[in-house]
Amino acid sequence: MNVLGVHLLLELRQCNPALLNDIDHIRDMMLAAAESVDAHVVGESFHRFNPQGVTGILAIAESHISIHTWPEYGYAAADVFTCGSSFHPQVVADLLIEKLECLDPYIHEIQRGMIPQTVTT
């Protein structure tokens, strides 16, 4: 089987609550993560909730990087999805874990777009 993409689901527990609530930090770290793997950002949207929490998404030519934070729980849910093999999403995941000072990360990897390999005769 050929795989069209890899999707990482990040469960980021025991993160620094102040960083989870800082929209500028979230945006800067996500852009730095995209830049670190030479991803091509084609759009972005970030929002800070009242009284707390941030959501953000980077649309990248290679797919997307997204995050939703719950500072009151020290928790963030993030996705890193890349189509093709231009970069490995684990590099982005590692940077997000580091920049949020996450002490208890869990990463679930899903292969997306599993298609039969064509056989030519």
Image (spheres, helix red, strand yellow):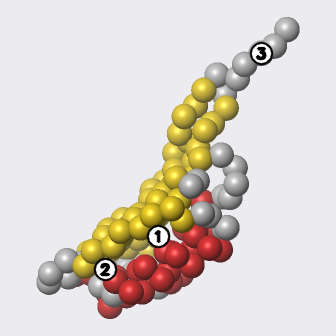
Q: What residue do we see at 33% from left, 87% from top? A: 22
Q: Residue at x 41, y 80 (%)?
A: 26
The residue carrying mark 2 is 74
In this view, the residue in front, 56 or 45, is 45
Q: Amino acid at mark 2?
A: Gly
Residue to which mark 3 is pinned: 119
Which residue occupies the extreme bottom position in the image? 18
Residue picked out by circle 1: 105
Residue that extends furthest to the top in the rendered view of this protein:
121
Q: Which of the marked residues, 3 or 2, is nearer the chain's N terminus?
A: 2
For marks 3 and 1, the one nearer the N-term is: 1
Residue type at numbered disc 3? Val
Apparent side of residue 62 relative to residue 1 in the rendered image (left or right): left
Query: Residue drawn 42% across and 86% down?
Result: 25
Q: Is residue 51 above or below residue 65?
A: below
Say few, some or many: other residues with alpha carbon within 10 Å of mark 1 (under 14 / 14 to 19 / 20 or more).
some
Dot 2: within a 10 Å radius of its alpha carbon, few (fewer than 14), some, or many (20 or more) residues? many
Where residue 44 sits, quadrant-wise, is bottom left
| C-alpha span from label 3 to label 1 | 40 Å
Q: Are marks 2 and 1 in contact (CB under 8 Å)?
A: no
Q: Tell me if residue 29 can be seen.
A: yes
Residue 55, x across and y down, in percent: 31, 70
